[in-house]
Image (tube, grey):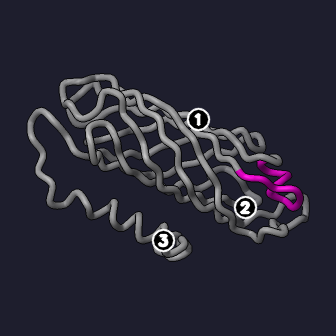
């Protein structure tokens, strides 16, 4: 995990640390909450059988407007891995009331993709280098059957351009889509 954190670009690492410690002094009431965390497992529209796993969290700054971040890594892919770290603003339409059981949301993040891939004997290299920035819109819903634990369903699109190398073989020329299913807590 420390190798993953030190591999992040400094602005992204700083944003992750701010999000991790920003909620330490915020008091929670019995009717509203200020933040939520989540863990996820996702299926991708990349090579068959590739999946992802990761964790993240969000802090709500004004009504449903939030700031969040997450880190995810490739699972079940023997030829290499893609690690994505991302920060994003989000909007939760029915946010922050503990009594609500459904919480739909949208987000649009920017992040950093770190790759270590060898596909068909071709290493992951291209003109832009092995690491690249991406943009990522997403939408989903959190369902809260009990007060502090819920299920999170999300669709996220990772958008970037690649014209050659093994990344093209794995993800296609314009990125990929990921369906995430996970647990969320508040």
Left or right placement of residue 125 versus residue 180 in this view: right
Whichever of labels 2 and 1 marks the residue nearer the N terminus, that label is 2
Q: CA distance from mark 2 to mark 1?
A: 20 Å
Q: Say above or below: 37 vs 138.
A: below
Magenta extent: 160-171
The residue carrying mark 3 is: 11
| Residue 150 in which image quadrant | top left
Q: Position of residue 55 (x, y in %)?
A: 44, 52
* Image height of 81 relative to 10, above or below: above
135 and 124: which is toward the camera:
135
For disc 1, the marked residue is 179
Question: In screen coordinates, is 14 left or right of 154?
Answer: left
Frontmost residue, 176 versus 67 = 67
Mark sitting earlier along the chain (3/2):
3
Q: Residue at x 58, y 35 (%)?
A: 179
Relative to 82, is 5 on the left or the right? Answer: left
Q: Nearer the viewer, mark 3 or mark 2?
A: 3
* Rendered location of residue 47, percent (x, y): 78, 44
**Residue 179 falls within the magenta-colored stretch:** no
Q: Quadrant of residue 152?
A: top left
Is residue 165 one of those drawn in magenta?
yes
């Amino acid at each position: 995990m420390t190798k993953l954190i030190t591999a992040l670009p400094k602005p992204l690492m700083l944003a992750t640390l701010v999000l991790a410690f920003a909620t330490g002094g915020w008091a929670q009431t019995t009717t509203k909450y200020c933040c939520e965390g989540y863990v996820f497992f996702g299926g991708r529209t990349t090579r068959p059988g590739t999946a992802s796993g990761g964790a993240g969290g969000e802090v709500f700054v004004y009504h449903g407007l939030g700031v969040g971040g997450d880190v995810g890594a490739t699972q079940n892919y023997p030829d290499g891995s893609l690690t994505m770290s991302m920060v994003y603003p989000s909007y939760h339409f029915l946010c922050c009331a503990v009594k609500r059981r459904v919480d739909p949301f949208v987000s649009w993040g920017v992040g950093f993709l770190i790759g270590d891939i060898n596909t068909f004997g071709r290493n992951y290299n291209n003109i832009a280098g092995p690491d690249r920035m991406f943009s990522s819109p997403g939408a989903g819903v959190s369902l809260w059957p009990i007060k502090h634990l819920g299920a999170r369903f999300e669709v996220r699109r990772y958008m970037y351009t690649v014209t050659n190398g093994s990344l093209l073989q794995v993800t296609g020329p314009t990125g990929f889509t990921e369906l995430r299913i996970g647990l969320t807590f508040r």
